[in-house]
Image (cartoon, rainbow, N blue to C red):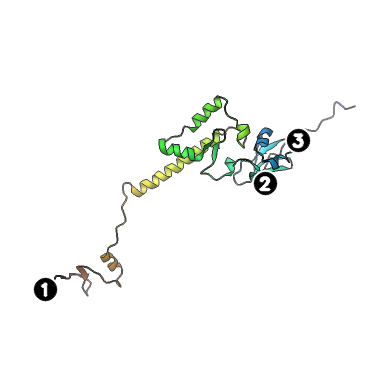
Amino acid sequence: MEDCCTVKPAAPTSPILCPECGKPGRPVERITVKAMLRPGALMRLSAPEHRFCPTPACSVVYFGIEEVFHREEIVVPVFQKEPAGERTVCYCFAVTEADLRRELEQTGHSTATAEISEHVRADRCACELKNPQGSCCLGNVATAVREALYSSDCAARRAQASTGPGYMPRPSTTTTDTARARPDIAPTGPQASSPTGSRMYIDTTTPR
């Protein structure tokens, strides 16, 4: 007969810190892990709970009790683990960083956040099945838009600095200039230097 006063051990929970990078992970639903794992990785899934590791430099995506899954075991590229430039920022509606940059270049602003928010309100998103982090992508979208705006602004400033007010094109080098800078090169043409270094005019007309 079981003693009613016996303290039962707590149910196993996932570790909080990633076993490889040591950074805290975010709790993620089991359905997300199952949807994101490649078949070989899914076959060894055993831990009851998992966390998502968002650290960019760490190859671990999910970890649980005595269990880790790495980038190459995930069916899609993971936003946090990929280099900026061509990442998918919204997995449900296939919005990429390239899409954001194109819209910014054409219109000067981005409507991605508003459009995705509208889909969320209409209950069309499926983040728990399509997004490796298992949660809404709007934070990632906002980050990508800020980065694209910053990159676009820097490019515009560089262009303005090279062609805007105060820009002075580099003067072309003439033969005389070259000869002046290089005494070993004899000057040609109607102007030359006298042996004393002063300019003199050389008459090249045919004497009558």
- The picture places residue 58, in percent across and down from the top left corner, at 63, 46
Say which residue label 3 marks.
12
Q: Quadrant of the N terminus?
A: top right
Mark 1 surroundings within 10 Å by alpha-carbon count, few (fewer than 14), some (14 through 19), many (20 or more): few
Upstream in the sequence, badge 3 or badge 2? 3
Do the residues under discs 3 and 2 have CB atoms within 8 angstroms? no
Upstream in the sequence, badge 1 or badge 3? 3
Say which residue label 1 marks.
207
| SS assignment at label 3 | loop
Q: Amino acid at mark 2?
A: Glu
Say which residue label 2 marks.
20
| SS assignment at label 2 | loop
Do the residues under discs 2 and 1 have CB atoms within 8 angstroms? no
- Name the quadrant containing residue 198: bottom left
Residue reaching furthest to the right:
1
- Name the quadrant containing residue 122: top right
- Name the quadrant containing residue 197: bottom left
In this view, the residue in front, 208 or 138, is 208
Residue reaching furthest to the left:
208
- The picture places residue 150, in percent across and down from the top left corner, at 46, 41
Mark 2 surroundings within 10 Å by alpha-carbon count, few (fewer than 14), some (14 through 19), many (20 or more): few
Tell whether 194 sits left or right of 121. Answer: left
Q: Which mark lies nearer to you, 1 or 3?
A: 1
In this view, the residue in front, 184 or 188, is 188
Upstream in the sequence, badge 2 or badge 1? 2
Q: Amino acid at mark 1?
A: Pro
Q: What is the spatial separation of the Cα atoms under label 1 and label 3, in whole angstroms? A: 110 Å
- The picture places residue 202, in percent across and down from the top left corner, at 17, 71
Q: Quadrant of the C terminus?
A: bottom left
